[in-house]
Amino acid sequence: MTTDKDQSMDDQSPAVVFAVKGIDVTPNKDEGVRKVVKKQGEDGDRPMIGDKVAVHYTGKLLNGKKFDSSMDRKKPFIFNLGKGQVIKGLDIGVSSMQRGEVCMLLCKPEYAYGSAGCLPKIPPNAMLQFEVELLSFKGEVLTDDGGITRRIKVKGEGYNSPNDGSTVHVHLEGRCGERLFDSRNVHFVVGESEDMGVPLGVDRAMEKMQKGECCMLYLKPKYGFGKDGRAQHKIGPNSDLMYEVTLNDFEKAKESWELDLKEKLDLSARAKQKGTQYFKAGCFLQAVVQYQRIVSWLEMEFGVGKEQQQTIQNFLLVAQLNLAMCYLRLREYALVVENCNKVIELDGKNEKALYRRGEARLFRNEFSLAMSDFKLVLQVNPSNRAAHGQVSICQCKIREHHERDKKIYANMFQKFAEHDVKAGKGKRRRGEDSGVMNENHQVAIKRRRRSQDHGQDCP
């Protein structure tokens, strides 16, 4: 790749510059986007499809007239690469750049705004030139907590993706640091990848992929092998992982709306069993997936017979109670309370829901609310020894909290009192000084008068 160090594009015809120094960066080499590097970037990685990139750019017509510039706005322009958020020429051009690189791009109309243009600034069939600086880029974050990041190496076909319950056929390569610890072709059911030793982060990414896609997945420990690691792969506790995953094929599962009630109940029974299996193995996030399936299938089922409605309610109670238990283990206490509340809406005297909500509130230092929950448990079952113990713990915590508050306020008031004493002494001292000054002033006045009476000047 050549650099344009000697002469600015403003000094000569853009068409001449690109013809002499530009290179074709289009995938099919049709000369639709030509590029001249003005400043070399950092050696290393280039942005991939889906990456969030930050650039500065200035766009001009071939006559030199500027139609847009992020520099004028004094704010970088941020977009997801390869997602159609900018013109095709910019997607292609930026994907060829390195961090810190500055380049010129010449885009033919079919890679810009085509025959329609973008009036009034850009006429139809306009060839455009851009000066672009790539400031930064990072992968696409797939989860709210930032635990899974994806970078797409090869874009997949179409827009169809696996859904929960799909059977997927993938090739994967897992690395911890630079070490390759897993390389194989494998198929699994989305939501049940743990059965094949595939971590949850790979499983959760499946619903974002298309057939033929190859991507890099960066997994935080929560979505990898967690705090226990994986001895068979010599993966230590709390290790970050990177998987390169290719989705070769998949068979979609039926969507919820395509299932009849019998199918939903059969699947719920299987999900309950699978969730229990994962919970006992300490795979709490995987268990959550199973119990959430039951809720998604059944929570909107109405207008059925009394017996069927009771079966549905029983499944929902179990699923939400078990979700609460999973979230307790995961220390997601707000979600514990949320799921217990749903159980209590269905069954106001559910002993397990009241107890687990009390535990979550106790962990959140909501001692009075927790004690109320444990007392409700005792109203339902006076012989619940664990609830008696928790009431005592809450009472101790409340007393400790009050004692701590008393000490804090006592120290606070002591400091206020000390401050008032110091302030009072300061006032008295100023008052005494003022009195002495007044007395001296009066003596000086008397002496001055006596001197005047004797015709003498004041000393």
Image (tube, helix red, strand yellow):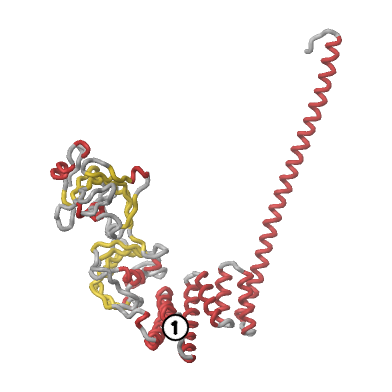
Q: Quadrant of residue 273?
A: bottom left
Neighbourhood count class around disc 1 (C-alpha, 10 Å): few under 14, some 14–19, many 20 upward: some
Residue 11 at x, y percent in the picture: 20, 36
Image height check: is 320 above or below 30?
Answer: below
The C terminus: image quadrant: top right
Considering every residue shown, the one lying at the far top of the view is 455
Q: Residue at x 29, y 57 (%)?
A: 81
* Residue 405 x/y as whole percent: 67, 60
Q: Give the residue type that dot 1 points to.
A: Glu
Q: Quadrant of residue 207?
A: bottom left
- Place residue 266 in its image quadrant: bottom left
Q: Position of residue 125 (x, y in %)?
A: 20, 51
Residue pointed to by mark 1:
301
The reply, left or right, for residue 23 in relation to residue 46 is left
Residue under the image location 41 percent in, 78 percent down: 293
Left or right: where 451 falls relative to 374: right
Nearest the viewer among 442 and 16 is 16
